Image: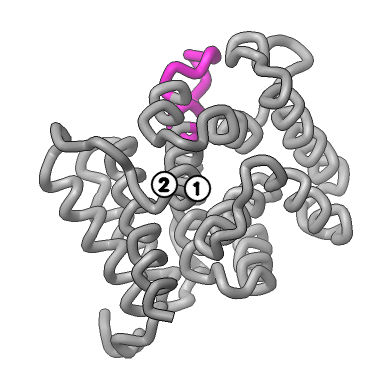
Amino acid sequence: MLTTQISLKSRFRAIFTSILLNAEPNHADRLKALTSCVINDRLSNLELIDAIDITLLAIAIGAYWHQDLQEVRSRILGLQSHCNADIQELVLAYAIALACRDELKPQSCIDHICHDFNKRRSLSHDLKDQQQCLDQLQLAQEFVNQGTSAITAHRSQGLYNGISSSLYYFLSTPHSWSLVTERAQRHPQTNNPNNLQITLQAGAITSAYLGKIGNITNQDREILTNGAIIGDRLWEQWSGVFDVKLDN
């Protein structure tokens, strides 16, 4: 049990450090606030600024509730009632949860997710959107298996939704957080406002999978400290070190 907790703690630290390394400057306070909402299970009536907020919530939900995928589903589905969260956020949260459970296998994770989601018909506002998302995930896996370049993978008839692109970058080079985030930052659709979202997602999935970031000695020490603080707090609450209701 101790080994699992130490490993999980490192995954939590890596996830939130990855977010802060890729997010806009001074995003630590917003990330702390959103993470607190997940810890305290106060997601209803939450004021979300933009799509990045929804992405950060999905990542935090996947990490905090990783032990129970039903809880992950219920909270993402709950977000759908008052924001633009949808099937892509559920895929993201699932990937994070599976990584925290040490069950995210690059060779089979998309098949795993699609198999689970195909059994459920109400995971999206629109059943057609759900099927299109799953089709995109399968296409991402095909491109990875074929060694297709990022430019080719994102041409017409290729990948067009954010989570499929994020998983494409992760699955192409799952051994290196730096490679994944660098490739995502150079996403071919340079004018796409979702580029930051794609990078945040790809980096979070990879860091959760690896449990580390890699060589980041030249990075801002404050960012690394804040990432560790947020990750440690999530782990402490998850492991029951502190009473969630009292630790605000």
On screen, residue 103 versus residue 239, left or right, reads: right
Magenta-drawn stretch contains 98: no
Residue depicted at x 79% and y 41%: 134
Residue found 81% across the figure and 35% down from its top: 135
Instruction: State whether residue 146 is above or below residue 212.
Output: above
The reply to whether residue 198 is in sight is yes
Please state which amino acid type lies under the numbered disc 2: Ser
Residue range (magenta): 185-198
User: Image point 28% across, 62% down: which residue?
Assistant: 230
Q: In this view, does 190 lie above or below 234?
A: above
The residue lying at 87 percent from left, 41 percent from top is 128
Which numbered mark, 2 or 1, is in the foreground of this view? 2
Amino acid type of the residue that numbered disc 1 sits on in the rendered structure: Thr
Residue 162: % across, % down: 60, 33
Answer with left or right where residue 91 lies relative to residue 58. Answer: right
Determine whether the residue tagged by mark 1 lies in a helix, strand or loop.
helix
Determine whether 210 is above or below 21 in the image: below
Residue 193 on the magenta segment: yes
Q: Which of 44 and 6 is in front in this view?
A: 6
Q: Is residue 53 at all visible to an observer of this figure?
A: no
- Mark 2, Cα crowd under 10 Å, few <14 / some 14-19 / many 20+, is many
| Residue 146 x %, y % | 72, 19
Please state the horizontal and vertical placement of residue 20, each as a whole percent of the image.
Answer: 29, 44
Residue 90 tag number: none
Looking at the picture, tell me which residue is in the foreground, 165 or 216.
216
Give the labeled residue for mark 2: 207
Q: Which numbered dot is residue 55?
A: 1
In this rendering, position of residue 161 left or right of residue 244 = right
